[in-house]
Image (tube, rainbow, N blue to C red):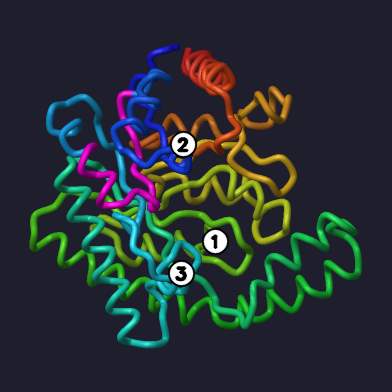
Amino acid sequence: MLDKGEYSFSTCWNIKKHTIGRNMIEEIKELGFRQVELNYNVTEEMMKSIEPMIEKGEIGVSSVHNVFPFIDDKDYDTDSVMLGFDDEVKRKRSVELLIRSMEYANRYGAKAVVVHPGEVPFEYNIDLDLKKLYRDHGKDSPEYQTLWKDMSERRERLSPLYTKRIQDSLEEVSEHAAKQGWSVAIGIETRSRSYQMPTLMEAKTICENLKGGPVYLWYDIGHAMMMDRMGLYDNLKELQEVKRYIYGVHIHETLELSDHWCPYVHSKDLQYFDHFLEAIDFAKVKVYELKAVCQPDEIDESHRLITSKIAAMKG
């Protein structure tokens, strides 16, 4: 397997098949990675066998994914209102949980915490219905367009309120981190559901308003491709506007509305993903976030294509 150098790899790939943390990390190391992103399903129990590996330098930690380590509470899972909660007690708890994730990141020498900052809340998962209509009838169908209009009207109306609240929460976290002297970036991640935050422009607003703090954009390439397909924003155009705010990237590709595939390899498209090479090259933290079905040889081939294309681009 190729040595993957500065690139990191998320534990989301193999966490479901391991109960012992060390075994999970060893399997990732066999792919040629020297660094990992510890995702939000990693438990304190798993960390008991991973921490000695970190201490001995057997593995580096590029980033941790909030909420870290895992907590079994649906209110604060990865698809929640999080830092934008109307309920002040819940919002404060979300702030505390992010601080806790940052504390672990600092302890492990990680450069960043990846955060799903929030969403415009809906009564139900409207995105599930939208994706079904997209698959069954297509994006231009009246069925899709009608529901899309309902979703986007509410989203646009409430976005400023939730953007501001998320921003205030991030400011609290940033102030705490500054007092502690932590140099850990907070990366707010582009999401995979149309009502979730931030869009690229919402991320730009938050990063602009918190300039000088540790808050950046975490550009999840596959999610942004998906939101572009659904019609939430113009990914390639807006990427040029937000590129300078990027701290980290999640590297994966989507097939239609299915994410976490190996770039180039699964889409069989050797051109389109080129649009993201500049962002990958620019990012301080580069993490592959792939699904379990991706095989070692596919991961290797995808990495070979990405790195050789970046080298040629800079050549």
Select label 1 or label 3 by which is in front: 3
**Spatial distance from mark 2 to mark 1, Cα to Cα?**
29 Å
Q: Secondary structure at mark 3?
A: strand
Image quadrant in which you'd find residue 221: top right
Select label 2 or label 1 by which is in front: 2
Q: Label 1 near label 2: C-beta < 8 Å?
A: no
Q: Residue at x 58, y 49 (%)?
A: 223
Q: Residue at x 74, y 45 (%)?
A: 256
For label 3, count other residues whose C-alpha is less than 10 Å away and answer few (under 14), some (14-19) or many (20+): many
Disc ID at residue 199: 1
**Spatial distance from mark 1 to mark 3, Cα to Cα?**
11 Å
Q: Residue at x 69, y 25 (%)?
A: 271
The amino acid type found where label 3 is placed reads Gly
Label located before the other in sequence (1 or 3): 3
User: Does the magenta segment cover residue 49?
Assistant: yes
Residue 3 percent across, percent down from the top left: 38, 14
Taking 42 as reference, is 101 left or right? left
User: Does the magenta segment cover residue 168?
Assistant: no
Q: Secondary structure at mark 1?
A: loop
Disc ID at residue 14: 2
Question: In the image, is residue 38 above or below residue 44?
Answer: above
The amino acid type found where label 1 is placed reads Thr
Location of mark 3 (residue) = 118
Residue 181 percent across, percent down from the top left: 9, 54
**Spatial distance from mark 2 to mark 3, Cα to Cα?**
26 Å
Select label 2 or label 3 by which is in front: 2
Q: Which residues are magenta?
A: 34-50
